[in-house]
Image (cartoon, rainbow, N blue to C red):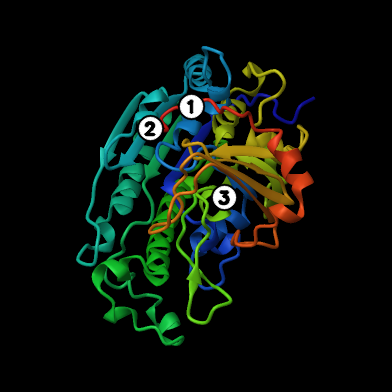
């Protein structure tokens, strides 16, 4: 019998998501100098997916969460339609709270209620009044709502990203760079705001509020099976590396480099005997943002899942009930496509594909191949050395990719 047999208890799920967040800025993904104790504790008590990738990198990449795997097909039904029917049949209350404007993809998912909160960003903001702080406070209030607690429920909290931190957190890591001869405080405001030390401070502030949210959740639990998902739609390009030329820095040139396409995904499961083994678990399976809706369906109604064969649910990946993927495909919505395996990242750029700022666009078609995991920064293109690998991997990508929903939005 499947380990995902149906539970008789009310089921709960809490999602914390971001438009963009650098996986390699978090301790549980290997960062050794940015303090993220709350995120790391959540990971230590749960599961970390090391190879989680976006489906579309860039604007409206969250549409993959809403539409699931059907954007490539001609089916009229979408994963969000399936989710709507199952949430209704299982009497699951669903609410969403976001920072800033409500995005188009967020309206696709069938929430009973969706609302936005705002806050203050920048040096003069109070740490407790940033957009993410207000999101967490609104989330705690909603989670503790006595009406919302009466049935199975889904609460989704979404933020754009770490943002610009206030004084105190902005300078938290300045000394680390001053020891290397960098005087960050003397930089102009725009340059300083883009410095890795400032991003690091913002990530630590974000981690503080994740800790507040998880502590409240754990205090509220009374045996209800509860799934917590922390994830991002995109990664973030926040670091550069030294090249062979003294004093020069280099960034990956493709919009589908690992720093942008690979995103954090951490799961924590409470009070569910089916997943007692999911503690301090790291998975090297290839997974993707499109797997969210099948995961929610598996959580709330595993026996009612309409997917045949079984869905690419993160829960089934953890129990290894489905074969591991050998590869993933993703793109930027503008013609550039990638195939990712555990060993290779192969990128095909088509048309006038822009690269980094102040660089000329790539004209025509160009292929790139990077060795994984050795080439962390995607800077050593070995396509000319392994043409047979490039040819084999690119056979998985159609010549004319269908337009991804929301790519131009």
Going by the image, does 294 lie left or right of 83?
right
Q: Residues within 10 Å of mark 1 (few under 14, many from 20)?
A: few
Dividing the picture into quarters, in which one does residue 199 lie?
A: bottom left
Pick the front one: 274 or 37: 37
According to the image, label 2 marks what residue?
A: 408
- Is disc 3 placed on a helix, strand or loop? loop
The answer to whether 49 is drawn above or below residue 298 in the figure is below
Q: Which mark is residue 338?
A: none
Q: Residue at x 66, y 31 (%)?
A: 312
Which callout, 3 or 1, points at the residue further toward the start of the chain?
3
Q: Residues within 10 Å of mark 2 (few under 14, many from 20)?
A: few
CA distance separating discs 1 and 2: 9 Å
Q: Residue at x 45, y 26 (%)?
A: 151
Pick the front one: 101 or 145: 101
Residue 139 percent coordinates (x, y): 35, 43
In front: label 3 or label 1:
1
- Is disc 2 placed on a helix, strand or loop? loop
Q: Are circles 1 and 2 on residues that touch, CB within 8 Å?
A: yes
Pick the front one: 137 or 71: 71
Q: Residue furthest left?
A: 124
CA distance separating discs 3 and 2: 22 Å
Residue 370 percent coordinates (x, y): 67, 55
CA distance separating discs 3 and 1: 21 Å
Residue 355 percent coordinates (x, y): 46, 52
The answer to whether 228 is drawn above or below residue 65 in the figure is below
According to the image, label 1 marks what residue?
A: 403
Residue 364 in view here: yes
Q: Which mark is residue 262?
A: 3
Q: Residue at x 31, y 66 (%)?
A: 193
Q: Residue furthest front?
A: 364
Which callout, 3 or 2, points at the residue further toward the start of the chain?
3
């Amino acid at each position: 019998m499947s380990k995902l047999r149906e539970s008789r208890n009310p089921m709960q799920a809490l999602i914390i998501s971001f438009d963009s967040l650098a996986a390699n800025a978090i301790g549980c993904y290997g960062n050794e100098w940015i303090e993220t104790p709350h995120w790391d504790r959540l990971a230590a008590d749960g599961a970390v997916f090391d190879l989680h990738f976006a489906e579309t990198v860039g604007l409206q990449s969250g549409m993959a969460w809403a539409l699931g795997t059907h954007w490539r097909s001609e089916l009229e039904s979408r994963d969000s339609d399936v989710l709507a029917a199952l949430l209704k049949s299982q009497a699951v209350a669903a609410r969403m709270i976001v920072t800033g404007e409500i995005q188009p993809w967020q309206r696709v998912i069938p929430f009973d209620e969706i609302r936005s909160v705002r806050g203050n960003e920048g040096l003069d903001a109070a740490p407790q009044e940033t957009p993410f702080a207000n999101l967490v406070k609104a989330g705690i209030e909603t989670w503790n709502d006595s009406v919302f607690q009466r049935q199975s429920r889904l609460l989704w909290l979404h933020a754009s990203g770490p943002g610009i931190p206030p004084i105190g957190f902005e300078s938290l890591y300045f000394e680390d760079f001053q020891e290397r001869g960098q005087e960050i405080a003397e930089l102009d405001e725009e340059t300083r705001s883009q410095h890795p030390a400032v991003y690091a401070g913002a990530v630590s502030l974000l981690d503080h509020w994740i800790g507040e949210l998880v502590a409240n959740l754990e205090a509220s639990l009374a045996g209800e099976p509860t799934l917590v998902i922390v994830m991002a739609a995109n990664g973030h390009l926040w670091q550069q590396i030294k090249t062979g030329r003294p004093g020069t820095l280099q960034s990956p040139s493709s919009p589908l480099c690992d720093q942008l396409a690979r995103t954090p995904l951490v799961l924590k499961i409470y009070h569910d005997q089916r997943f007692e083994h999911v503690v301090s678990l790291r998975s090297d399976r290839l997974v993707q943002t499109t797997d969210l809706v099948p995961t929610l369906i598996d959580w709330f109604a595993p026996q009612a899942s309409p997917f045949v064969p079984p869905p690419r649910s993160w829960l089934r990946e953890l129990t290894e009930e489905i074969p591991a993927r050998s590869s993933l495909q993703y793109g930027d919505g503008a013609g550039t496509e990638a195939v990712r395996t555990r060993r290779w990242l192969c990128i095909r750029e088509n048309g006038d594909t822009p690269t980094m700022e102040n660089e000329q666009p790539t004209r025509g078609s160009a292929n790139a191949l990077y060795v994984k995991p050795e080439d962390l920064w995607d800077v050593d293109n070995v396509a000319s050395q392994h043409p047979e690998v490039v040819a084999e991997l690119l056979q998985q990508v159609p010549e004319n990719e269908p337009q991804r929903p929301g790519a131009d939005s």
